[in-house]
Amino acid sequence: MRYVTVFILSLIFWLLLTFRLSVPNLIVGSVASLICSLIFTRYFITSVYKLVQPKRYFWFLVYLVVFTWECIKANFDVAYRVLHPAMPIKPGIVKVKTSLKSELARMLLANSITMTPGTISVDIIDDYLFVHWIYVRSDDPEVYTSIITGKFEKYIKNIIE
Amino acid sequence: MATAIFICIGVLFNIFGCIGLIRLPDVYNRLQSATKCVTLGCCSILIGVAIHFGISDAFFKALFAIPIIFFSSTVAAHALIRGAYHFGAKLDKRTVKDDYKDAVK
């Protein structure tokens, strides 16, 4: 079941990307999707029934809005630090605990952190994310955990887990 | 008109990213500016392209390039920054905190 889902999703993605419904295109797309589904299904969500729960799509839309806003803020933040003559930076690598369990959710969280203002994820070891921060605003682990992961963790939990 | 605005914003952010690449002190901070600014810049340019072509094949291709760029750039940034740390690239002298040092030992 999971293999079939990955196959169909990647075939749809291929067809939208090439945007042509000719027979050679379909054959190439099927072969590529087959290879993708064989290799990458083990990274896919554990139960495909999560894909038909509308609640998750609602949270995904909320997440997209929050994320786009953070992303735009991140760009102005970086532009400000770069163009400021004195360059107000105070970089550091901080350790942040995450409560997400599945691999896909952690991947999404790490990618979100990379696109938010001033942070970029370095590594994940057990339950801890290591985040490079361009301006360390606080020394208290609780405070910076809520600043870095707090915004996204609850949405990602609702979407994937 | 909207096309021109989106493409101008995109080019502007790409320029900021490049300035950051030159001005910031070490590889970690440089990656910050390279990832964020250049990703949003490229996405903005792609949205401009999508608006310019209207509903056609180029529209869908441009919109589908956005998540691809997004995922590839974030994953590449993660791989580069982790690789740089393990290679031994020095953190800048203004760095105030390094929790990762204890974890990788």
Image: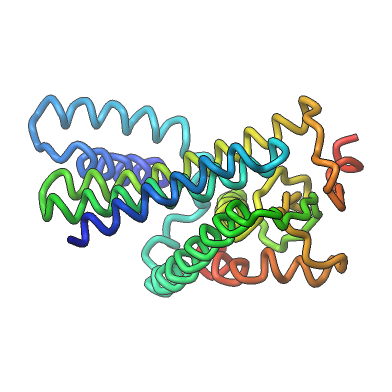
Seen from this angle, which residue lies furthest front?
A85
Spot occupied by residue A156 in the image (x, y as percentages of width and height): 55, 65
Using the image as rendered, state which of residue A90 and residue A15 is in the foreground.
Answer: A90
Quadrant in which the C terminus of chain A is drawn: bottom right
The way the protein has been coloured in the rendering is rainbow
Give the total of numbered labels.
0
Comparing A31 with A84, the one in front is A84
Above or below, B87 against B103 in this view is above
Residue B47: horizontal and vertical position, in percent? 28, 54
Residue at image coords 32%, 43% = B65
Which quadrant of the view contains residue B30? top right
Which residue is at the front of the view, A122 or A72? A72
A135 horizontally vs B69: left or right: right
Residue at (13% x, 44% y) in the render: B57
A80 versus B22 height, above or below: below
Of all residues, the one furthest to the left in this rendering is: A22
| Residue A131 locus on image (x, y percent) | 73, 51
The picture places residue A20, in percent across and down from the top left corner, at 11, 37
Residue at x 33% of width, y 31% of height? A34
Q: Residue at x 55, y 40 (%)?
A: B75
